[in-house]
Image (cartoon, grey):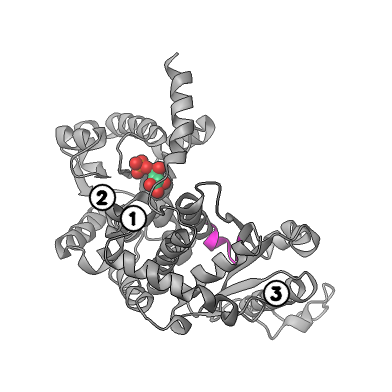
Amino acid sequence: MIKINYDYSKTKMKDILKHNEKIKEIVKNFNEGNCQGSDYIGWYKFPNSIDKNIIENIKKDAEEIKKMADVLVVCGIGGSYLGSRAVIEAVKGFYNKNMEVIYLGNTFDERYTEDTLNYLKEKNFCVNVISKSGTTLETAIAFRLLKRLLQDKYGDDYRKRIYVTTDEKDGCLREMADIEQYKSYIIPKDIGGRYSVFTPVGLLPICVAGIDIDNFLNGAKEAYKDVKNENFEENIAQQYASYRYEQYMNNENIEIFVTYSPYFNMLAEWWKQLFGESEGKDGKALFPASANFSTDLHSLGQYIQQGKKDFFITQIKVTNEKEKVFIEKDKQDIDNLNYLSELSLGQINLSAQEGANKAHYQIGKVDNFTFEIDLINEFNIGYILFTFMYSCMISANLLEVNPFNQQGVEFYKKEMRKILVK
Ligand code: PA5
């Protein structure tokens, strides 16, 4: 279950209620398909309308991949990999016994690419190459290298180790899939990369990692019901969008997404892409930053406490930690830790959060918007991702920018191309 609270925020529900009328208008236009970027709102109904055959094929292919391989390489960048990686690491952590999932195609870094390819030489692996456009250079280069390695390792059998997720008709990846007869999945035309985690883009890698994709989709379906709640005071997605807008209007320029687990680092990366790429247009928007506490309390914590105050925090609080790791009583107690011996590490982590909240809010005057999650599981992660996507749609519309395009990203590609074709 997901809840929100304003406990450590001077901005309260009463302060954001004023945006309610504007939000109603945005929701009405969105529901009527009468909003900016209305060609790209397929994500909204997708978890409810996804074809059962697609789910069955994903499950079947995931089993095949697990039989054939010890490692799945997800080859993609931006929305084509961040969602699945965020879910897999949040739910399964870093030491997943079901299947190792690693990532390539999201960088030009030569050393990382070479190291990954060398690592794969010793492993049995499959590749899921994911690109909606089919032309993204980081991904295309990595795929060419991976394909060569597969051919060297498996000869003519290499084809059955490649799974393509791309547009139904357009792009060279689709052409390649058709010519080479790879198994392939479709990214619907009306769903953009950063809104695609509930399509095969996210579902295939997530399923291969051993996560229950039905439950993941159920979380999104539940959120779909809740984002439609017309009572603003019960609507988490609307309140979050409204809160962000209120902060922005009060000259807070930065939003720091704070989590208390390294397993949420990629969730933060996904969140940054979602809000950064959807909103950063026309010289507007909050800058989406992130911090991982308590680790970063020993670095950024200083700035947050006493630095320039033009930011607020959005944090995730996990209320029901597993309580499996306790500090044993020690006869000598030279490290003076016996006073913690009744507590689990989860409880200590929650105390760190409570302490940081008090210090940041009461002394540092930093506002905190808190999402409370009782348990980390695929249902709750599905719920929160969908809620963020819907919030982002509202929030971008409050800024009067199109949430679903990203023309700014093209500029570096053009400049890079000019340099490369010289
Ligand atoms: O959200 C988006 O649309 C982008 O971040 C894309 O996902 C990213 O640029 C990768 O594009 P593609 O899937 O076409 O390779």
Judge the density around disc 3: few (<14), some (14-19), many (≥20) Cα neighbours within 10 Å.
many
User: What's the residue type where badge 1 is placed?
Assistant: Ser
Question: Is the CB of mark 2 within 8 Å of ligand 1?
Answer: yes
Question: Is the CB of mark 1 within 8 Å of ligand 1?
Answer: yes
Residue closest to the eye, 215 or 256: 256
Residue 273 is labelled as none
| Residue 213 higher or lower than 186, as above or below | below
- Which residue is denoted by mark 3 in the rendering? 357
> Disc 2, disc 3: CB below 8 Å?
no
User: In whole angstroms, how far apart are the C-alphas of marks 1 and 3?
Assistant: 33 Å
Residue closest to the eye, 24 or 360: 24
User: What's the residue type where badge 2 is placed?
Assistant: Ile
The residue lying at 42 percent from left, 44 percent from top is 406
- Which residue is denoted by mark 1 in the rendering? 196
- Find numbered disc 1 in the image and state the secondary structure of the residue it sits on: loop
The residue lying at 36 percent from left, 69 percent from top is 27
Which quadrant does the N terminus fall into? Answer: bottom left
- In percent of width and height, residue 65 lies at 27, 51
User: Can see residue 239?
Assistant: yes
| Span highlighted in magenta in the image | 256-265
User: Can see residue 216?
Assistant: no
- Which residue is denoted by mark 2 in the rendering? 187
Which quadrant does the C terminus fall into? Answer: top left
Q: Residue furthest top?
A: 422
- In percent of width and height, residue 122 lies at 40, 39
Q: Is residue 385 left or right of residue 4?
A: left
Tell me which label, 1 or 3, sits earlier in the chain. 1
Tell me which label, 2 or 3, sits earlier in the chain. 2
User: What's the residue type where badge 3 is placed?
Assistant: Asn
